[in-house]
Amino acid sequence: MLRLLGLLSRRRARARAALSIAGIALGVALGYGVHLVNRAAVEELAASVRTVAGEADLQVRGGRSGFPEALFPQVARIAGVAWVNPALELDAGIAGSDERTLRVIGVDALREGVPQLLAPDKVLLSPLAAAALGEGPLRLVVGQHVVELEVAGVGELKGFAALTDISTAQWRLGRLGELNRLDVHLARGASRERVLNSIRNMLPPGVHVATVDSLEQASGYPSRAYRVNLNVLAMVALFTGGFLVFSAQALEMARRRGEQALLRVLGLSSSGLARLCLAEAAVLGVLGGIAGVALGYGCALLALRYAGADLGAGQLRGIAPHLAFQPIPASLYVIAGAAVAVLGALLPALDAARTPPARALKAGDEQRMFQRAGRAWPGLALLAAGAGLSQLGPVNGLPLFGYAAIGCLLIGAVALMPRVSGWIFERIPFTSRTSFALAVAQLRGAPGQAAVSLAAIVASFSLMAAMAIMVASFRHSLDAWLDAVLPAQLYLRSTHAGDTGYLEPGFEARVRALREIERAEFLRSGRIILDPARPALALLARDRAEGAFPVVGARHQRQPGEPPLVWVSEAAHDIYGFDAGKTIELPLNGKSVRVTVGGVVRDYARQHGAIAMERADYVALTGDRRVNDAAVWLRPGVTPAQAMEAIRSLPGGAGLDVAAPPEIREVSLAIFDRSFAVTYAMEAVAVLVGLFGLSSSLGAIVLARRREFGVLRHLGVTRSQVRAMLAAEGALLALIGAAAGLVAGGAISLVLVYVVNRQSFNWSMELHPPYLLLLALASTLIVLAIATAVVSGREAMGMGPVRAVREDW
């Protein structure tokens, strides 16, 4: 502790310690803030399931089309069932809102103890919905009409929801005779497994039964991959903070070799010296962890207020979670900060303990510590391990091996830098320019100190480059995909009206009959459930479904006698194994229908999987002629504005959402940028921590060379030549670090694009590096390194030449 106080008493050491604390604090803040938001969101989702299900033991669920209400008494008569609550739960569009939907839950009002809902057209709003919608009737979109319901008050509901009697929900939402949920309560002593199996055996295709506990766990599945990736990115920032500690501790240990040798001579054991060094790092880590927890809590509050529970991803719009400070997770993050700091100081501490006092007192001995890290085999082994791990599949739907591969590649690249930089320094030719020759000589003579700076550069710049390449590749692939799926000149849809919005069959004929329209293709969207533990698959029945999406891989040509063709998205292929040419069964309209997979298509709009089929086949199998969307081609000479006016003039057309492809593209890319906004911010913080490390290590190295500069000036080297020497050193280090960071970042980006992204979101993309952005980032890095070296050198040259020679004698 005395040594730590002594460290903090010196101005420059105090600044380096503060920088280390700041690096750890930023990493802990990101990790703890993301943890708080994720935990609050998952708990709120689980509470929503529990609130709706009440004290039910099992729950029967159907897809968007639900199931006949005749199933309700059949389940109620099963032995071991005490009673069953029928329910109809739908996402209904709000009139006047193009995007927002309200979860309407129809229940048996008498059994649920809400008699005020027994009157027709009465609803109770959740607190969140009441605050957003204000006073007045609730106006919902059903088909192409608006239904008004009277708000009877505010109920104890979670999220953005409304509660009504089941008869009102069936009648007013156009679902007479239908249910889509049964809450099953078991009799005392009944076997849950036996009742579950009995119910499962009587359910029609597409309807599933599960325990409420499993549904609570599944409620967070849709956003799981996004949340896990944010956690990993937060840990990257903490990992980068560990490099800051390593940089500061390595340079401080090198500077104080003489002090450490004196302590050893006075009787301090080698293990005691190591413990002293690690204790110093642990204190810095604890201070950073405490500051990070406080900062993370504040960031989580701001994130929930301005970005929402999904941090801008748009996946959890209907919930409003509340943060709760919990001592145990906070303590674990403080411990994580201390652990990262200790790991960062481990190599310098061990070297200080192993070095004999007599050797440590010799001038130049500090380079031995850096030389120990110059072996090539650990870095090569880590790179090989990273390449091998990248070939492994996901674990429970998460790219855990992909994350491990990125870690190995990053650490391996950093571990190789001493050897790589030494090899490069030896091959840089001398020139007649004094400043450049001195810079090369310094880098050759003290390659270890340069390697410390390069570690910070490579760690931060490689991650920055990798993320930039991944995001640019994703955005470019999304843009190309929009070109492929938006071939028409105009698109119309029944707004974002969830389960209740559709275009009526007569409206389809009226659109086709417009003189402004040359051709129109319509689409019916729905949902089917294949696994109750996973989100539902989107079912897209559209005119000319073949060719509507870009095909990935082989196509299957339908053979005589084969079932109708369908096209499955990459997510459906990866999750359920739907290969081209395979015959599968889909639940449609309460029946199991055999279809053949025609191919795998790319679909960025539906993360959890989609299946597209010809609308004619869908109508023949289900009898459902309703549609939700349409693509419209105009006659020559007709402008989009004229066609929009004609469509909106039709009966029921005023409430439609009509847009041209450029507008749809702009909105889609804006959603993409909003989804990655938090990712950009977290990446920026991680890079900022790395740049702090670069400035700290360069500044510390320069300031430690005060006597060297004094001697150079005594020998006739001018101040401007010393500054030029430092600028050349900074530029060379930054250039090598940026080049190595680009190589390492390129390798990491391959894992992000082809492994992590595919296994997390089931989307493939083409690699598209942003060359101009990478060049700009590398140039900024070089300028920063030069500026840091020159500014630090100006302060270091304050020692007079005579004093410098006397101290160096």
Image (cartoon, helix red, strand yellow):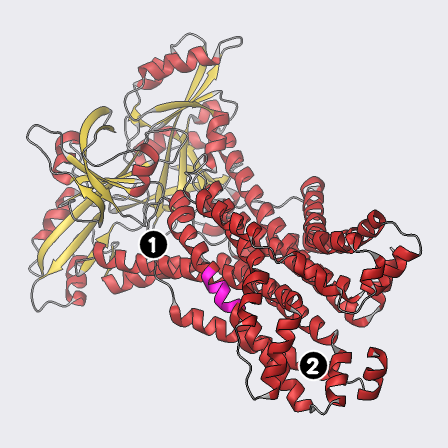
Q: Residue at x 54, y 36 (%)?
A: 156
* Magenta-colored span: 737-743
Q: State the residue position of label 1.
A: 98
Tag 2 near tag 1, CB within 8 Å? no
Left or right: 356, with 574 as reference point: right
Please state the horizontal and vertical placement of residue 561, each as a whole percent of the image: 7, 27
Q: Is any part of residue 677 visible from this angle?
A: no
Q: Is residue 447 above or below residue 377?
A: below
Which picture quadrant has residue 165? Answer: top left
* Residue 55 sits above or below residue 236 on the image: above
Report the front residue among 374 and 531. Answer: 374
SS at badge 1: loop
Which residue is pictured at 68% across the width and 58% down the height? 246
The mark nearer the N terminus, 2 or 1, is 1
Residue 57: x and y in percent read 49, 20
- Which of these two is toward me, 369 or 78? 369
Q: Nearer the viewer, residue 667 or 530?
A: 530
Prevailing secondary structure class for the magenta stretch in the rendered image = helix
Residue position marked by numbered label 2 in the rendering: 793
Q: Residue at the spot x=46%, y=43% of the render?
A: 389
Q: Is residue 763 left or right of residue 584?
A: right
